[in-house]
Image (cartoon, grey):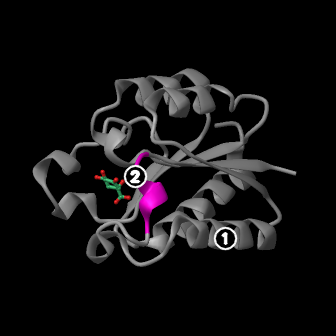
Amino acid sequence: MKKILVIHGPNLNLLGKREPGIYGEFTLEEINSRICQLAQSEKVEVEIFQSNSEGDLVNKIQETPDIFNALVINPAAYTHTSVAIRDAILAVGIPTVEVHLSNVHKREDFRRQSLISDVVRGQVAGFGVDSYLLGMRAAINIIKNDGEG
Ligand code: DQA
């Protein structure tokens, strides 16, 4: 069975209590359970990983070759700062979908720049939990259509 890795970056473990006006009322557990339901109905395997540490996120991305067919990632604040995460995505060459709960393009200026958006297949932003589900659907279509990356 094809396998998708979903990565959540820093502070996303606080969803539900963290700025609910911006990020919504869903907890990370609730989001993860929606992701798992979708994976089950689309008959793909999913593994979900969250870390607040940049190095752990890089290590996890480095594990993807030969295990995962696609990556769905919300690098959270590291989106705007991490050359290391960008380089890891480029190094492994796995088809990657970038997701954000909020519409990063209509917030502070510094959130408009993503260091990964030009090395991923596409970005979904601004739809709350649906950003993850749309990102998952994009990853599933990529796997079905050209799984090669
Ligand atoms: C975020 C947007 C980032 O700018 C922010 O630092 C986050 C979450 C989002 O999902 O909307 O932590 O990636």
Residue 93 visible:
no
The verdict on residue 107 being magenta is no
- Front residue of 50 and 138: 50
- Respond yes or no on whether mark 2 lies under 8 Å from ligand 1: yes
Quadrant containing the C terminus in the rendered view: top right
Judge left or right: residue 5 versus residue 99: right
Which of labels 2 and 1 is toward the front? 2
Q: Quadrant of residue 119?
A: top left
Q: Indicate the amino acid at tag 2.
A: Asn
- Residue drawn at x 81%, y 49% is 2
Residue behind mark 1: 33
Identify the residue at image location x=16%, y=45%.
110
Taking the image in four quarters, ligand 1 sits in the one at: bottom left
Q: Nearer the viewer, residue 109 or 32?
A: 32
Q: Quadrant of residue 128?
A: bottom left
Question: Residues in magenta?
Answer: 10-15
Vertical placement of residue 140 versus 82, above or below:
below
Residue 45 point in image, percent of width and height: 80, 55
